[in-house]
């Protein structure tokens, strides 16, 4: 298996809050756009294997061409896993375990059992394989087993053991483990609440390229929690996370660009980012984009699009008195066009709630 390429299950610690309060920061009263956190941050998602192939290959010899080019032995098991040949991945990983006791192969077997890929789903067996690999120093296995212990999958729930495993994986440079451990320090249940320690862990993960950690650390810099307040550093980190398609970072970075908070003011870039996040389903982005479209700030004024995005954001629970008033001032034709344009989104929102 390629080193560090298999983060575990990526299951969310949905109960963890990034910041102790949920109150948004309020910029200057004259600003059209108000910063507001749109979601509770969660651990980075794992690399997803391709969908199962219709047929298994005769061999997985082409599974890791990069390793072959570098002169290293190709990792046939992980190559097959990434291409969707899960039964082949299972056989190759089993072979590696039997011949060399490879902990990376053990972790892959745990992943296959955890998700029922190529074999029947069996969380107990997955936990056993993760535990064997973790005992042999594999950081990915430590992280996977930590998630299992935290959620009680494949055995009893054990938050203390989960925290210990996260700490061990973080020491080995596992970005998602460092990020999750930081969330536990923010939560203040497993450990005494410690924003400074959380910031250190988020920085470790952020420097390793975790968009979630970049967003979390940016928020701490923005609010001066655990680190000195630094709006320029907050904007820089938010920009990195936004570039990596973290949707919450895209929204907040767009608002920073619009208001010129910690970065040069750029309403056009802000509007483009809000468009991107709005199309990805962020109600906050949809609301802020509607405001820009209503006023022609950073984007050509378009009352139909403004009302459309307002209707969509409102259906998702984000009302706005200013936009309600703007909508009522439009002609019946504009409102009808906006309603038609919003209809597929409104239907999807209703279906998601049924």
Image: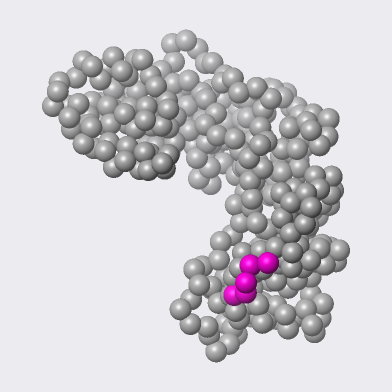
Q: Residue at x 31, y 29 (%)?
A: 311
- In the picture, the quarter occupied by the N terminus is bottom right
Picture coordinates of residue 158, whole percent (x, y): 81, 48
Check the image and name the residue furthest to the top: 29
Horizontal relation, residue 237 to residue 136: left or right: left
- In the picture, the quarter occupied by the C terminus is top left
Horizontal relation, residue 69 to residue 348: left or right: right
Picture coordinates of residue 243, whole percent (x, y): 51, 44
Picture coordinates of residue 89, whole percent (x, y): 63, 77
Residue sitting nearer the eye, 8 or 205? 8
Q: Is residue 71 above or below residue 116?
A: below
Horizontal relation, residue 330 to residue 229: left or right: left
The residue segment tinted magenta is: 118-122
Residue sitting nearer the eye, 101 or 353? 353
Q: Is residue 173 above or below residue 231?
A: below
For the question of whether residue 314 can be seen, the reply is: yes
Would you identify the image quadrant in which residue 267 lies?
Answer: top left
Q: How is the image coloured?
A: one colour
* Residue 37 among those drawn in magenta: no
Would you identify the image quadrant in which residue 316 lies?
Answer: top left
How many numbered discs, if any?
A: 0
Q: Is residue 101 above or below residue 256?
A: below
Q: Residue at x 53, y 73 (%)?
A: 84
């Amino acid at each position: 298996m390629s080193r560090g390429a298999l983060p575990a299950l990526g299951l969310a610690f949905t109960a963890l809050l990034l910041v102790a309060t949920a109150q948004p920061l309020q910029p200057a009263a004259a600003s059209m756009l108000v910063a507001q956190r749109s979601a509770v941050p969660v651990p980075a998602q794992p690399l997803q294997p391709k969908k199962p192939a219709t047929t298994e290959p005769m061999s997985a010899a082409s599974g890791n061409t990069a390793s072959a080019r570098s002169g290293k032995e190709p990792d046939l098991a992980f190559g097959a896993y990434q291409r969707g040949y899960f039964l082949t991945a299972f056989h190759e990983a089993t072979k590696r375990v039997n011949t060399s006791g490879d902990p990376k192969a053990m972790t892959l077997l745990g992943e296959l059992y955890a998700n029922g890929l190529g074999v029947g789903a069996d969380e107990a067996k997955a936990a056993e394989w993760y535990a064997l690999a973790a005992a042999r120093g594999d950081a990915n296995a430590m992280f996977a087993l930590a998630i299992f212990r935290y959620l009680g999958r494949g055995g009893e729930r054990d938050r203390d053991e989960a925290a210990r495993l996260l700490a061990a994986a973080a020491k080995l440079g596992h970005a998602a483990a460092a990020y999750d451990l930081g969330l536990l320090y923010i939560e203040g249940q497993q450990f005494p609440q410690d924003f400074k320690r959380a910031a250190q862990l988020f920085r470790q993960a952020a420097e390793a390229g975790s968009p979630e950690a970049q967003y979390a650390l940016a928020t701490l810099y923005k609010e001066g929690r655990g680190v000195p307040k630094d709006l320029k550093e907050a904007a820089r980190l938010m920009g990195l996370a936004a570039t990596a398609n973290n949707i919450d970072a895209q929204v907040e970075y767009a608002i920073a660009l619009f208001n010129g908070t910690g970065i040069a003011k750029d309403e056009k870039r802000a509007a483009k980012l809000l468009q991107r996040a709005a199309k990805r389903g962020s109600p906050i982005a949809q609301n802020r984009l509607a405001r820009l479209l209503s006023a022609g700030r950073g984007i050509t004024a378009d009352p139909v699009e403004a009302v459309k995005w307002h209707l969509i954001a409102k259906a998702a629970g984000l009302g706005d008195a200013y936009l309600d008033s703007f909508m009522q001032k439009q002609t019946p034709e504009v409102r009808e066009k906006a309603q038609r344009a919003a209809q597929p989104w409104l239907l999807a929102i209703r279906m998601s709630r049924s």
